[in-house]
Image: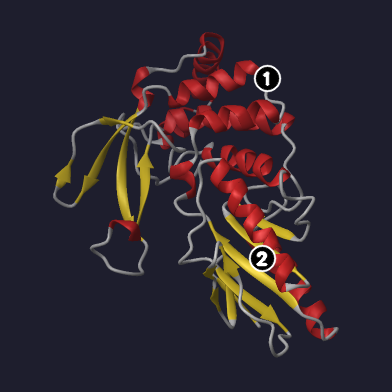
Amino acid sequence: MKSGKAVGPDDIPVEVWKCLGEAAVEFLNSLFNRVLESERMPEEWRSSVLVPIFKNKGDVQSCSNYRGIKLMSHTMKLWERVVEARLRKVVEICEQQYGFMPRKNTTDAIVALRILMEKYRDGQRELHCVFVDVEKAYDRVPREELWYCMRKSGVVERYVRVVQDMYEWSRTVVRCAVGQTEEFKVEVGLHQGSALSPFLFAIVMDQLSEEVRQESPCTLMFADDIVICSESREQVEKNLERWRFALERRGMKVSRSKTEYMCVNEREGSGTLRLQGEEVKKVQELEVLGVNSPE
């Protein structure tokens, strides 16, 4: 873990464990073994502080333009790293997923998409692309779906219970400029700011995408960012509908206002793209992971 991060409710920074050296390693090893054996973590780790962060776009007074980041115990985050390492040994994530995967990064996903677009430009063929925005992705994941996806991915029952314990009786307060709220329970979604959440989300998306990969093979994912490509508008429209259905079955939702459609080498009369009868916004540049890919 990096130094200089905001502390959680226990006020113990990660620098404490770094400074203690071997003594910290021995203590944490003993502590984590006890947590694993009992499948029960310390009660102090269940509390967090939720800080709303403005996304720097849209109306500053609209709650939807804020991202909530949880300040959690750094010691719990170290435990999460241990659990993540164990899960990665048994869970295989599909090749189309670039988010938080070893030896893959944002640049790889962008380069792969641009190479595909250039290939179709050079061949003077149409390529239809849809960027699918999953609305409040981490916040919407139903916990029961997470347990189901972990089991289906081959995670042994002990580690399913260990992760369940991380979410049992989780509590938070919201802190803003004028103070903070009373503590309340959080009963849905993944922890924002958690060290383990990105990989848990990748597990959910992997199981979800398994339902549509056969019919929609030309798909790139970076965590909750999805790009669907096809040579025909009709096919990409069908694949978009398959993704919508698969996401909604898992308790998630496509953001209609942020999902965008673009056509490379568009011919006259290529038409518009629709999702459940509603026209998808057509753009000249597709913004993927903060980088524009021009038509």
Front tag of 1 and 2:
2
Lower position in the chain sequence, tag 1 or tag 2: 1
Q: Residue 147 at what x, y percent from top left? A: 57, 27
Q: Which residue is mark 1?
A: 156
- Marks 1/2 in contact by CB < 8 Å: the verdict is no
- Quadrant of the rendering where the C terminus is positioned: bottom right
Q: Secondary structure at mark 1?
A: loop
Q: Residues within 10 Å of mark 2 (few under 14, many from 20)?
A: many
Distance from the alpha carbon under mark 1 to that under mark 2: 38 Å
Q: How is this picture coloured?
A: secondary structure
Q: Residues within 10 Å of mark 1 (few under 14, many from 20)?
A: few
Q: Nearer the viewer, residue 164 or 248?
A: 248
Q: Amino acid at mark 1?
A: Val
Residue 182 higher or lower than 162, as above or below: below
Image quadrant where residue 215 sits? bottom right
Q: Residue at x 61, y 28 (%)?
A: 148
Q: Which residue is mark 2?
A: 237
